[in-house]
Image (tube, rainbow, N blue to C red):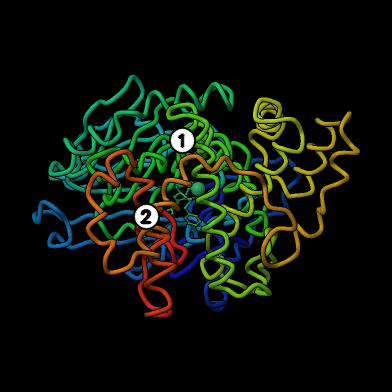
């Protein structure tokens, strides 16, 4: 039985012999089970080749088919996929669960004017022997991956080399700006390898998508997908690249076994992301973003309500669409737990050693929160007393804010608070005391924090519950 969603199955062949199959009734977001009847009873470990001929639907929940008008160049259509969490079934029949890992190879035939890319190493291109107006692109992914990391893009794409293992891909209109914006990529990869161990995926390319790409970034192996809204011009959103790079270890090597344990993917990835940015811009900068994350967590919990089940770190997704649950909670409650443990167990160096050992232990596997906790206890076997102080039940299973707030260095945040307080307390007569000099020593991140504080203090009470895509109301990276 394989997962499918809106696929038209034409034929199934096993070891060269056509076989019977049935497609069950559609179960809403889950799609339809494809049941294949085996030709003979198979013995354990016997290899079978299953060939399925099928068609996807224009409505596939994994695919966006863009018209030429929806692209920068306006001349050619564009296709991209987004499989996480459970949309791979809307591209191909599969066991659509992160508990199963697979390698893959692919050949994609596209019109000559277009380029195909996948979440894999490029393995050559050639004219399509069946049609001279088309080209075939080949791919190979030799590292076992969960199927939510299968990805495909087809468009009028160009590339530029920005590092020894990195090309940036986009339509030609964005190539130059993208190369400048993401110039820190190789430095980030080196820091990530220092923290996580060797980078096993070979290539690390970036793809800048059209604006309808629904996330800030997606860690498709060998080819991170990013939104064009990262092209700020000042590299100020490069933490998204640090984040997607970090998934090359946490998520893509060590994978959540089910989506209930999604925090394992995202919490550890945010933790690594903030260390990478900390190495580049200083420990105070790491603490500033850690505190920003606590603010995001508070906002999310306020939006859901502090008894809502989706504010738990470990969730129960039985009969629930993972897309409905998606929020900052697994990211920031997960990060807060790791940052709290870092402080409890002896500081960043000690905790980074744990993280490296964790990655080594569970690479190429899919794990649960219990596996993570058992390894934490095994690694810190001399600190069991300390670990037993942690209210695990509350951290994992209670809704609302965590039982403990970690400690944060306030240096960079204080500048934002001080300026916002000056504005909030100002009287008519004080207006002349404000000038652009107030902002000259602040980074763009601090300006955003200052504006978020102003919005919470001033705008929110005046205009309750509106404005989507604004940081103070709980959306990450300001892109929604
Ligand atoms: N893997 C996620 C995106 C995702 C999660 C897509 C779940 C579908 C289902 C990606 O790594 C991510 O976390 N992106 C963030 C950016 C990051 C800097 C927090 C985003 O898009 O907001
Ligand atoms: Zn992520």
Q: Pointer 2: residues within 10 angstroms few (<14), some, or many (20+)?
A: many
- Residue 81 image label: 2
Rendered location of residue 104, percent (x, y):
48, 39
Q: On screen, 198 above or below 450?
A: above
Query: Which sits in the foreground, 348 or 271?
Result: 348
Q: CA distance from mark 1 to mark 2?
A: 19 Å
Q: Is residue 407 left or right of residue 52?
A: right
Rendered location of residue 254, percent (x, y):
63, 39
Q: Pointer 1: residues within 10 angstroms few (<14), some, or many (20+)?
A: many
Q: On screen, 204 above or below 210?
A: above
Q: Which residue is mark 1?
A: 245
Quarter of image, res 235: top left
Which of the image's four quarters has the C terminus?
Answer: bottom left
- Residue 32 visible in the snapshot: no
Q: Nearer the viewer, mark 1 or mark 2?
A: 1
Rendered location of residue 378, percent (x, y):
84, 33
Is there a contact, CB below 8 Å, between mark 1 and mark 2? no
Query: Which sits in the foreground, 259 or 141?
Result: 259
Which of the image's four quarters has the N terminus?
Answer: bottom right
Query: Which sits in the foreground, 463 or 175?
Result: 463
Q: Is residue 403 left or right of residue 439?
A: right
Element under disc 2: strand
Rendered location of residue 64, percent (x, y):
31, 61
- Residue 368 visible in the snapshot: yes
- Mark 1 close to ligand 1, CB under 8 Å: no
Residue for point 59% across, 36% down? 253
Element under disc 1: helix
Query: Which sits in the foreground, 141 or 16?
Result: 141
């Amino acid at each position: 039985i394989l997962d499918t969603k809106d696929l038209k199955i034409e034929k199934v062949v096993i070891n060269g012999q056509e076989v019977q199959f049935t497609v069950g009734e559609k179960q809403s977001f889950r799609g339809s089970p494809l049941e294949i009847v085996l030709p003979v009873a198979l013995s354990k470990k016997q290899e079978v080749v299953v060939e399925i001929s099928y068609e996807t639907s224009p409505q596939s929940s994994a695919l966006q088919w863009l018209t030429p008008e929806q692209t920068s160049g306006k001349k050619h259509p564009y296709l991209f996929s987004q499989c996480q969490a459970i949309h791979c079934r809307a591209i191909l029949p599969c066991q659509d669960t992160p508990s199963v890992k697979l390698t893959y190879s692919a050949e994609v035939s596209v019109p000559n004017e277009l380029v195909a890319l996948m979440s894999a190493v490029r393995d050559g291109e050639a004219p399509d022997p069946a049609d001279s107006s088309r080209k075939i692109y080949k791919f190979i992914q030799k590292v076992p991956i969960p199927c939510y990391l299968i990805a495909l893009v087809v468009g009028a794409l160009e590339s530029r080399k920005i590092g020894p293992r990195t090309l940036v891909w986009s339509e030609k209109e964005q190539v130059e700006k993208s190369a400048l914006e993401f110039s820190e990529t190789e430095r980030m990869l080196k820091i990530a390898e220092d923290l996580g161990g060797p980078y096993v995926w070979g290539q690390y390319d970036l793809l800048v998508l059209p604006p309808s790409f629904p996330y800030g970034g997606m860690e498709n192996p060998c080819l991170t997908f990013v939104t064009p809204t990262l092209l700020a011009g000042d590299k100020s959103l490069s933490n998204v690249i640090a984040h997607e790079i970090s998934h090359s270890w946490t998520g893509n090597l060590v994978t959540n076994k089910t989506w209930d344990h999604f925090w394992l993917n995202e919490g550890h990835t945010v933790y690594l992301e903030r260390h990478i940015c900390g190495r580049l811009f200083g420990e105070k900068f790491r603490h500033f973003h850690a505190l920003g994350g606590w603010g995001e967590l508070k906002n999310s919990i306020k939006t859901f309500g502090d008894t809502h089940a989706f504010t738990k770190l470990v969730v129960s997704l039985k009969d629930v669409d993972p897309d409905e649950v998606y929020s900052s909670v697994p990211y920031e409650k997960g990060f807060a737990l790791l940052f709290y443990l870092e402080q409890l167990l002896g500081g960043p160096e000690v905790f980074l050693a744990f993280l490296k050992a964790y990655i080594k232990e569970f690479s190429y596997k899919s794990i649960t929160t219990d596996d993570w906790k058992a390894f934490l206890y095994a690694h810190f076997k001399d600190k069991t007393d300390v670990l037993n102080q942690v209210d695990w039940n509350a951290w994992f299973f209670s809704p609302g804010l965590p039982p403990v707030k970690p400690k944060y260095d306030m240096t960079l945040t204080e500048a934002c608070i001080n300026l916002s307080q000056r504005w909030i307390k100002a009287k008519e007569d004080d207006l002349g005391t404000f000038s652009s000099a107030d902002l000259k020593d602040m980074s763009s991140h601090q300006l955003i924090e200052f504006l978020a504080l102003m919005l919470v203090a001033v705008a929110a009470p005046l205009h309750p519950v509106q404005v989507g895509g604004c940081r103070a109301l709980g959306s990450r990276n300001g892109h929604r």
